[in-house]
Amino acid sequence: MVGKKADKKSKAKITDEEEAEVFKQVREVQDRLEELNFQADQIKMNIRRCDMEGQRSNLTLKELEPLTDDTKMYRQVGKMFLLQPKPDLENHLRGTAALKNVESKQLQTALQKLGEQAASEANSLKELIGEDKMKQTFPNLQK
């Protein structure tokens, strides 16, 4: 009888150690998910910034269309303004709009990759804690 009690205690101790290890792994996965969410939020802000700058360039370009080519125009460079011919300014604005459009698409691709990484981390979390416990812990989580 004494041997059986000792076996039960050692089995319980192993399960406690295993549970602590699983908890540690769950915490690591949760930390990685939080980091991915933070990175995704930053990328979303950068996408929004690029879209705004591209739109600003396009709107400024539309405002320049009715003006004659001999109109004095200035382009801001840092804290100063430089006199620029209208065609040069239009080329600069078109280039800025195109650059921001490309940059925005690259950021959207990066955001999609982060989403895939987050899905992978969520699947590993599901494997660690089990599907039933995952549903209990996160009832709003969809497949």
Image (cartoon, grey):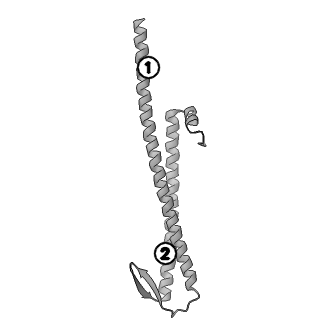
Q: Residue furthest front?
A: 79
Rendered location of residue 27, percent (x, y):
44, 39
Task: Say which mark, if any, is on residue 12.
Answer: 1
Identify residue type, mark 2.
Thr
**Secondary element type, mark 2:** helix
**Secondary element type, mark 1:** helix
Residue at 41% x, 13% y is 7
Rendered location of residue 93, percent (x, y):
50, 79
Is residue 101 shown to the viewer in this render?
no
The mark total stands at 2
Is residue 1 shown to the viewer in this render?
yes
Q: N-terminal of the two: label 2 or label 1?
A: 1
Task: Say which mark, if any, is on residue 96.
Answer: 2
Q: Residue furthest top?
A: 1
Picture quadrant of residue 138: top right
Rendered location of residue 135, percent (x, y):
58, 36
Residue at 58% x, 32% y is 132
Residue at 43% x, 88% y is 83
Picture quadrant of residue 8: top left
Above/below status of 24 relative to 7: below
Rendered location of residue 24, percent (x, y):
41, 35
Task: Say which mark, if any, is on residue 85.
Answer: none
Q: Is residue 3 left or right of residue 114?
A: left
Above/below status of 117 relative to 100: above
Above/below status of 15 relative to 95: above
Q: Which quarter of the figure is the N terminus placed in?
A: top left
